[in-house]
Image (cartoon, rainbow, N blue to C red):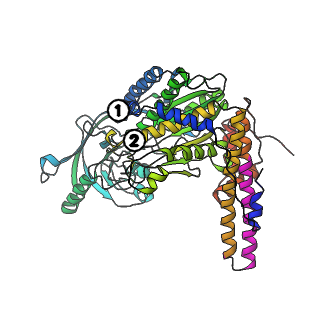
Amino acid sequence: MRLFLPICVLLGAAVAFPAPSPNPTLKSLLGEIRLEVEPTQAMDFVEHVYPNDRWFTFPKFIETTEYLQSTTVRIGLKRVERLGAPADGVSQFGCWTEPLAWDATEGRLEVLDPAVPVGERVLADYQKVPCLLCMWSGSTPPGGVTAEVVELKGTKPDAIARMDLRGKLVLTAQVPSDIKWALAKAGALGAINTYTENSNLLDGRQWINAWGDNGWAFTKGSAPLLCFSISPREANLVRRLLAEHGSIRVRAIVKSRYYKGIYPSVTGVIPGTGREEVLTLGHNAEQGAEDNATGVSAMLEAAATLDRLIASGRLPHPKRSIRILAMPEMYGSMHYIATHPDRMRRTIAAFTVDTPAGPYDTAGTDYTFVLDPQVASSYADALISKLAEDYFPSIDLGFRDYYIRKFGRPWHVHPFRTWSDNYLSDPAIGVADIAISSDSGVETHHNSEDTPDRIDPRSLRDISVVDAAFLYYLANAGKTEAVWLAQLSETHADRMILNSVEASLDGIAAANNARRLAGLWEGGIEKIDFEVGRGVQAVNSTERLVPESNRAGYRPLSEVIRLTQMERGPVNFDFVGYFRFLRKHGYVEFVKGN
């Protein structure tokens, strides 16, 4: 093993890392999948998911799930199940409290100022643009309410909570969910949101899907305040009226309801010959075409492609089952993990798909692969890097730009960050988990402008190809593949160690006193030791691919704290209290040791 080499580098030796031998199986797999994948079918999936989910009500989520269930059966998957987390506002899975189910049929906001032309008075009409009504908005009495609009400009939540806002609608450019609890305490009728992630979308309305008093979703005990979201153009109108008249009045009508229901999910498998599984997961139940109708649609196309290849005999039946899980973000995955512990123990790897499929010719739409956290370094990190390295340069983009023609579509890897359902590699769950992400070029995240016409089928194809290749390679991996992945992981680890060495040497070169030099030397050696440990862990993780096994891992809490601080830097965190919480809920056990 070459993992001793960074010490030589630190001492001044020159090092070159030989790459592992090429893997014809991987290249052949990518070629087969690329030829078989059908981007037009993936787009058809998008165009069936989007029309339902754009309304973001629980009855529409159920309609989407019914479509996903029938489609999953149609494309050849087996053991298809429709699951459902209890949407009752109280049930907990992991650290998450499930929301109450919500439905809406009307949402309208109208300026009453006679000076405003009739055609410009309606600021919100849910039936025309659903995003105009915030998810989990409360209801008005029949006939609506008339209210004064007051603007809050950057007021801190604690100050808002001490204000008297009884009966008023608050115009705010702050993220409404950040001040929801304060608005409730101040007695406000609700909020008119002007916050947007892209103010250049003059007629785009930001989707507000966080309206709880204690976190994301609306749970039992949250205040049923009204909430509308208006466009930058409409926000300018309202602010002009406030400047001219000092105050304005509006009429609000909302027909909505909270109730106990289900937050539905769908899962199914391409059966393997053994008991283990690989998993791809992504969420529906979002209003956008790119975020995230493209995610579940790419998963469906990846599974459909593999099923066709297996059925035709071009790929053998895999050793492990390949499972897809389409569910509400976080709330659905938490529920699935908590209610299927045996399946999770038999799941060796996951691929999380939460991404837009933006145009090839727009900057910022290249793909980034988010790796496992360093505490859970695995063979999956090296594999996804190799897959991207083999696939993306092969794409002929047809551009004149020399770099693009020579090197193909750009791609990146990124250290772990929590941004979606890519948390399965947490040691409490123990599943290697890679995630794919991208921007949409023109920023339409959580905006009414996130529509199917902005999707590039070529991007949707790329997601499907990489997802399918990652899943099948690991689903069919045996001893030969495990040995190659161990070599690949070693080379990947060597590069990470070298990066750490270079950073330490840069600091040492700049040290201006002996004390600083000694600290940098000691810290550099510790960082190298940390990186070596992560590399050894990644190489050893390939053992999971040979026989089916489930190995419990034991680690002193002091080591957990040390490794966390090495990866994230100094942290102020109650580790003991947190692990007592995990023990209470069955995620870890405490053992006595020497």
Q: Are marks 2 and 1 in contact (CB under 8 Å)?
A: no
Residue 311 in the image, given as x and y percentages of width and height:
53, 20
Part of the protein shown in magenta: 510-536
Quick check: 369 left or right of 38? right
516 falls in the magenta region: yes
User: Residue at horizontal 37%, vertical 42%?
Assistant: 456
- Residue 47's disc is 1
Residue 348 in the image, given as x and y percentages of width and height:
65, 34
- Residue 290's disc is 2
Amino acid on which disc 1 is placed: Glu
Q: Secondary structure at mark 2?
A: loop
Quick check: 372 left or right of 162? right
Secondary structure mostly seen in magenta is helix
Q: Nearer the viewer, residue 436 or 425?
A: 436
Residue 57 in the image, given as x and y percentages of width and height:
37, 33
- Residue 342's disc is none
Regarding residue 365, the answer to whether it shows in the image is: yes
Q: Nearer the viewer, residue 104 or 328?
A: 328
